[in-house]
Structure formats: C-alpha cells, structure tokens
Amino acid sequence: MKKVFAFVAMMGLLTFGVNQTINAQGTEAPATEVAGNDSVAADSTTAAEEVEAADVAVEEEEAPKGLHKTIKVKFIEGSAGFMSLVAIAMIFGLALCIERIIFLSLSEINSKKLLEDIQAALEKGDVEGAKAICRDTRGPVASICSQGMLRIDEGLDVVERSVVSYGSVQASNLEKNLSWITLFIAMSPSLGFLGTVIGMVQAFDDIQKAGDISPNVVAGGMKVALITTIFGIIVALILQVFYNYILSKVEALNTDMEDSSVSLLDIIMKYNLKFKK
C-alpha cells in the first residue's frame, strides 16, 4: 500500500509540475496536435489489444488438449466408417469380458470350508444335511459335490462317473463366450488393416487425380491408413489383456473343481466305511 500511495503522489506531483510549466510558458498545444496525439494513443491501444489477443490465441492453441478430445479428433480423422467398426468390436468384446469376469468371480467360493462342512455332516450320518449344504452353496464346485451326493447310495464308482461327467459340463460353462472374445480380438486389427488398405487406395486415387506425388496429396489417405491401424491394434491389446485374465480364472476354477472332486470321493469313501460295513 505504501508503494501505491507513493506512486500516486509522484504522478500527481509530475502532473502538477507539467501543468504549471505549460501555464507559465503560455503555450497551448494545437487542437490538431492533440487530436493527432489522441489518434496515436488510440492506434497504440488498438495495436496492443491485437497483440494481446494474438498471444491469447497462441496460448490456447499451445494448451494441451484432454485425452478424450484427442481421441475424438483422431477418431474423426481416421474415417468414421472403419473407426466405428473397430469401436463396435471393442464394445462387444469388453461387454463379453465383463460378463465372464463377473460370472467367474461369483463362481469362486471357499471350497475347503464347503468340503469341511460336508465331511462334518457325513461323520454324523446326516446325508440330507450334506445335500442341503451343497444345494445352498453357489458355484461349480458345489454343483459337482451336489451331483456326487445325490448318488451316494449307488456306490463309489457311480459317484465318480457322475462327478467326472458333470465336471466337464461345468468346465464348458466356465469357458462360455470365450470364442466370441477371441473373434473380436482377431477382428479389431483386421479391421484396422482393412482401413489401412483403403487409405492407401485413397492416397493413390488422389495422386492419380492430381497428377502429382507431393506429400500434401498423399497425406490424407496415409493418415486414415495409419490411424485405423493404430486403433485396431490398441483394441486388440486391451481385449487380449482381459482374455488372459479370464483364462487364468478359468484355469484356477478347473483346478479347484478337480481337487474338490478327489476330496469329495475320499469323504464319501470314509462315510461308506463307517456307516456301510
């Protein structure tokens, strides 16, 4: 604040001194000169405003765009027709991946605790209680155990065949829709390469029409070709990551089903030895 007051006071003293000097000399600036000075000042102000506006425009152009805006611009530049096909492949592929991930996540249970509960019920001779435990538990492991418990009175060989047969059915359910995901993984880069070929054809058509092979003529078609290829490869990579994650969950569940089947047969054999002598 002190600096502001000092500046204002200094400007006031200078203005007062200039006015006193002009009055003492008895000279007066001509009207034309004043008008000229005003015009110069106005021109200077206008020029300064134009420079400032230009600087602002340059700063706006140099400002980094958001990721979604950049993707939108490149999507339009890459020919909306082929880019839309790649986007549709990505949407359907991701939808199938999400569905499989949710299904497999819900299929995972604590199989060790389930088998312990079944064993505890069978040690008491409560077969119906063991069946109820299997029915009330979700997942393929519980379904296999339930099929085995339904045939517990038919002999261990029958239980084993039933468990093996139903286990293959459950394994097929776990791998459902995986073939469609692999289809979209293969389609995405293929659509990108198709866009590349068509972009090259457009570039050669432009060269033929212009009768020139300058970079400006070829740039448009080449840009379409490269952008479609890039997006197709990116979509394939994204779907491939989800696909491998899904395969790892399927393999883990298959292993869990096999281990649980063996454990269930052991539990049933102990039950037969204890209660069916």
Image (tube, rainbow, N blue to C red):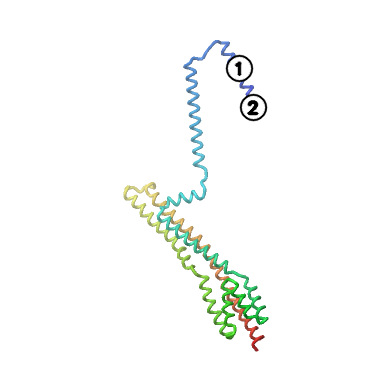
Q: Is residue 123 above or below residue 2?
A: below
Assess disc 1: are there few (<14), some (14-19) or many (≥20) residues with their C-alpha within 10 Å of its C-alpha.
few
Look at mark 1 in the image and give the residue it sits on: 16
Q: Residue at x 58, y 13 (%)?
A: 21
Q: In the shown orientation, is residue 58 left or right of residue 137?
A: left
* The disc label shown at residue 260, or none: none
Q: Nearer the viewer, residue 155 or 235?
A: 155
* Three-letter amino acid code of the residue under disc 2: Val
C-alpha span from label 2 to label 1: 18 Å
Q: Which residue is mark 2?
A: 4
Residue 161 % position (x, y): 55, 82
Q: Amino acid at mark 1?
A: Phe
Do callouts 2 and 1 mark residues in contact (Cβ within 8 Å)?
no
The residue that appears at 63% across and 24% down in the rendered structure is 8
- Residue 142: x and y in percent read 59, 74
Judge the density around disc 2: few (<14), some (14-19), many (≥20) Cα neighbours within 10 Å.
Answer: few
Most foreground residue, 31 or 152: 152
Q: Which is nearer the eye, 130 or 141? A: 130
Q: Secondary structure at mark 2?
A: helix
